[in-house]
């Protein structure tokens, strides 16, 4: 065999090697992610209701027109936006404060880190059931309110349209604090101590040093947490399913729960795919927003 053919063959093998390593993962992703996503995209333009004897019927944009005039969808969309506005700012700021607190070189500080991170490893099913008991009419929270004479009959945490979604938000925040704290903790430990020592000489100490040094250097982590928590807030499901099931009167129903309801309770798979497509576009927009902000941050530095 000529030398040039051997050389081309070795270059071809060198080019193919990384793709051969990726092939098993790509096959799994194709079967579990890419193909179902394409199928869902196709079904959003059809009428299909789990009747295996009848193929999907192409109906064009009828599902999207139905979505535009669907009052329940817009209620779930409003609840999802409310979730974003209510949860994301807390999960961006509060974990940073906790990370600064547990980053101190104090005796027994590791136990505080474990205590704050413990809710992350607890199953959402277990957490949801536990908080549902706490929120019950005769639960611990209402008993404490009665003992403190702050309420005579207690607060209908999960049974009032005014309280339900905010009560579920508390569980989401409680569950996510430790996770985002660890992300911030990794960033804090990468900041040299010399910067804080130099800042102390210039008169920047206490809380002021964190405003002058920590916050500017933690901007990439703040952006990362903001985007991750925003995407998680748009996909919230377990808390709603376990604690309120979207009630009362759709006051805590989110987009993902509405997709589940349409697909597996009402068996309107095509309409559920249409709602899912809209949710995908929202998450895609948040991801692109994150990439654009990340590029701007890199350019500034």
Image (cartoon, grey):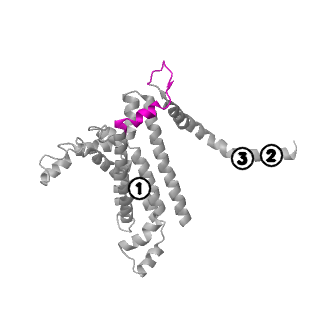
Q: Does the image show residue 123?
A: no
The magenta stretch is 49-73
Left or right side of 288 for 68: left
Residue that label 3 marks? 15
- The residues tagged by marks 1 and 3 sit, at their Cα atoms, a distance apart of 39 Å
User: Which numbered disc, 1 or 3, marks the residue that appears first in the sequence?
Assistant: 3
Q: Is residue 254 a member of the stretch shown in magenta?
A: no
Secondary structure of residue under mark 2: helix
Q: Is residue 51 a member of the stretch shown in magenta?
A: yes
- The residues tagged by marks 3 and 2 sit, at their Cα atoms, a distance apart of 10 Å
Residue 179's place in the image compared with 158, above or below, is below
Quadrant of the drawing holding the C terminus: bottom right
Residue 34 shows which numbered tag? none
Residue 180 shows which numbered tag? 1
Query: How busy is the neighbourhood of tag 1: few (under 14 within 10 Å), some, or many (20 plus)?
Result: many
Residue that label 2 marks? 8
- The residues tagged by marks 2 and 1 sit, at their Cα atoms, a distance apart of 49 Å
Between 153 and 62, the one nearer to me in the picture? 62
Where does the image place residue 62, in percent across and percent down from the top left?
A: 46, 30
Residue sitting at x 44%, y 24%:
50
User: Which numbered disc, 2 or 1, marks the residue that appears first in the sequence?
Assistant: 2
Task: State yes or no: discs 1 and 3 in contact (Cβ < 8 Å).
Answer: no
């Amino acid at each position: 065999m000529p030398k040039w053919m051997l050389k081309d063959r070795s270059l071809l093998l060198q080019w193919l090697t990384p793709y051969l390593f990726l092939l098993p993962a790509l096959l799994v992703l194709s079967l579990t992610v890419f193909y179902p996503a394409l199928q869902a995209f196709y079904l959003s333009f059809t009428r299909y209701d789990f009747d295996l004897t009848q193929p999907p019927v192409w109906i064009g944009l009828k599902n999207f027109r139905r979505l535009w005039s669907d009052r329940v969808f817009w209620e779930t969309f409003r609840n999802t936006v409310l979730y974003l506005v209510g949860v994301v700012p807390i999960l961006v700021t509060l974990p940073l404060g906790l990370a600064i607190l547990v980053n101190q070189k104090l005796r027994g500080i590791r136990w505080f880190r474990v205590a704050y991170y413990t809710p992350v490893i607890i199953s959402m099913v277990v957490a949801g059931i536990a908080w549902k008991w706490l929120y019950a009419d005769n639960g611990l929270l209402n008993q404490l309110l009665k003992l403190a004479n702050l309420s005579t009959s207690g607060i209908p945490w999960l049974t009032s349209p005014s309280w339900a979604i905010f009560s579920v938000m508390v569980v989401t925040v409680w569950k996510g604090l430790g996770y985002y704290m660890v992300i911030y903790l990794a960033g804090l430990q990468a900041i040299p101590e010399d910067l804080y020592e130099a800042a102390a000489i210039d008169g920047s100490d206490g809380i002021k040093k964190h405003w002058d040094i920590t916050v500017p250097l933690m901007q990439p982590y703040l952006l990362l947490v903001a985007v991750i928590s925003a995407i998680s807030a748009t996909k919230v499901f377990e808390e709603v399913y376990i604690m309120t099931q979207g009630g009362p009167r759709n006051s805590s129903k989110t987009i993902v729960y509405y997709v589940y309801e349409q697909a597996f309770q009402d068996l309107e798979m095509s309409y559920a795919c249409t709602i899912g497509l809209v949710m995908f576009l929202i998450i895609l927009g948040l991801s692109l927003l994150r990439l654009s902000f990340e590029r701007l941050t890199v350019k500034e530095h």
